[in-house]
Each structure stands twice: as C-alpha cells, then as structure tokens.
Image: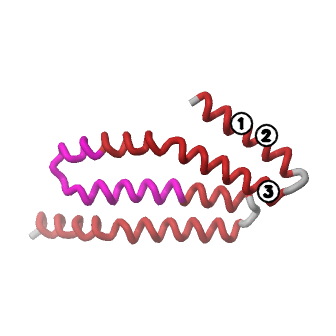
Amino acid sequence: MIAAIAFCICGCILCLVVRQYLRPQALLMGLAVCCMLILSVIPQIWDILDTAGNLFSLTGMNYDYFLILCKAVGISYLTQLGMDFCRDCGENAICTAVELFGRISLISLSLPLFTVLVDVILEVIG
C-alpha cells in the first residue's frame, strides 16, 4: 500500500512538472500511472471475487446475479475513471457522455434483475 501511494505521488509530481511544458504528454503519463496502479491490484481483485463468489454460493441464489453485480461494480469504476480522465483533459462534454454511457450500461445490465423482481412481485400478489 505504501509503495502504491508513493508511486502515485511520484507520478503526480512528475505530471505536474511535465504539464508546464508538454500538456498532452502529462495527460498520457497520468493515464499510464492509473493503468499501472490498476494492473497492480488485479490479483487482489481476483481474491475478492473468489471470496465473494464463495459467499454468494452459500446463499443458494442464482450465480448469474453475482455476475451482474460484479459487472455493475466494474462499469461504475471504469466510468468514474473515464470521467475523471476526461475532466482532467478539460473535456466536460465527453465527460458527460461517458457518464451517460455508464448509466445506460448499468440499466441495460440490470434488466434481467428487474424481470425477476417483477416475476416475484406478481407471484406474491397473484
């Protein structure tokens, strides 16, 4: 954790220095720091997914619901990262488009859950 924070701080300082002279390269450098940090936590993400999957299997619920949950969390994080990068580039319109795309993706992903929910409600009512 300390190494990751130190890496990010060094990356930020380096981006600030480079931004004064070469703004496009500073943005790419910031993106590279983000990608390196994300790649470094992938093993931890797999551990979390395995543990959560095991716990979810104990509930006896359909495993597809867990996959939908994992995809929704992934979409949320990636949308936030894309929005932040667009905002750093000064592209607020693209930032808004990324946000809209993320929201629509989440709604589309959750449609099977809404179908199941309606089925359960109709079963309880009827």
Residue appearing at x 55%, y 70% in the figure: 100
Chief SS of the magenta region: helix
Outermost residue to the left: 126
The residue identified by callout 3 is 25
* Foreground residue among 58 and 117: 58
Q: Quadrant of residue 85?
A: bottom right
Placement of the C terminus among the 4 image quadrants: bottom left
Placement of the N terminus among the 4 image quadrants: top right
Asked if the stretch drawn in magenta spans residue 62, the answer is: yes
Which x, y percent locates residue 93? 69, 71
> Whole-Å distance between the Cαs marked 2 and 1?
6 Å
Q: Nearer the viewer, mark 1 or mark 3?
A: 3
Residue appearing at x 31%, y 40% in the figure: 51
Q: Nearer the viewer, mark 2 or mark 3?
A: 3
The residue identified by callout 1 is 9
Residue numbers of the magenta segment: 53-78
Which x, y percent locates residue 12? 74, 42
The answer to the question of whether label 2 and label 1 lie on touching residues, with beta carbons closer than 8 A, is: yes
- Residue density around tag 3, few if under 14, some if 14–19, many if 20 or more, within 10 Å: few
